[in-house]
Image (cartoon, grey):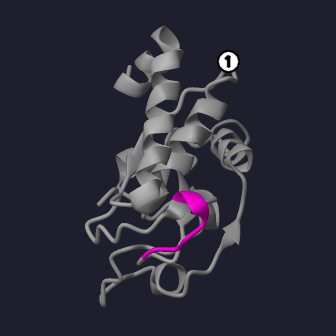
Amino acid sequence: MSAYVKLLRERPQAFEERVKEAYAVWKCCVLCGRGCGADRASGAQGFCKCPNEPLVASYGPHFGEESPLVGMHGSGTIFFSACNLLCVFCQNYDISHGREGERITVPQLAKMMLELQNAKGCHNINLVTPTHQLPVILDAVLHAAKVPAFRLTMQTTFV
């Protein structure tokens, strides 16, 4: 059992506190290596130009990962927009550099995770370029964990 699932089950208040601590970082954002210090809690956009709501370009079963991660039904991939790295060799350039995507709510993000797991049959949730959106991701995990069948296994590209 992963550490965060154990924490959610055994001490949910401690996980809730960690979500609050993650949101507090947005007051002077240092979530990524850029450390721009933007007050994202009040809606300012830092280097990443990301809003303080989840910004998702797409989600669904993805078969472009290693076989153990894909399984039979694909890796449940959520592509976040507005990556903070802006690598010149990025394979997701239009998503990350173009900041394409839709602003959604935390409950909608939790619903995406559950849909990938339950309706699509994905055995993991793969978060692509999520670093700058960590508070809303943790909050969505907290929401999704309220569903008894929640069994999230995450693969992520936090940088």
- Which residue is disc 1 drawn over? 148
Q: What secondary structure is the magenta-colored segment mainly?
A: loop
Please tell me how crowded label 1 is: few (under 14), some (14-19), or many (20+) other residues with Cα within 10 Å: few
Q: Position of residue 6 (x, y in %)?
A: 42, 17
Task: Name which quarter of the figure residue 29 lies in.
Answer: bottom left
Q: Which corner quadrant holds the C terminus?
A: bottom left
Q: Is residue 10 left or right of residue 113?
A: left
The boundaries of the magenta stretch are 41-46
* Residue 130 visible in the current orientation: no
SS at mark 1?
loop
Q: Residue furthest top?
A: 10
Residue 96, relative to residue 134: is it above or below? below
Q: Is residue 76 left or right of residue 3?
A: right
Tally the marks.
1
Between residues 52 and 54, which one lies in front from this camera angle? Answer: 52
Residue 154, relative to residue 128: is it above or below? above
Q: Which corner quadrant holds the N terminus?
A: top left
The residue under the point 63% across, 60% down is 59
Between residues 89 and 44, which one lies in front from this camera angle? Answer: 44
Residue 9, relative to residue 48: is it above or below? above
Magenta segment includes 37: no
Q: Position of residue 50 (x, y in %)?
A: 54, 71
The residue under the point 66% across, 22% down is 149
Between residues 98 and 61, which one lies in front from this camera angle? Answer: 98
Task: Name which quarter of the figure residue 107 lies in.
Answer: top right
* Three-letter amino acid code at the position of disc 1: Pro
Q: Position of residue 101 (x, y in %)?
A: 65, 74
Q: Position of residue 12 (x, y in %)?
A: 52, 17
Q: Is residue 95 left or right of residue 85?
A: right
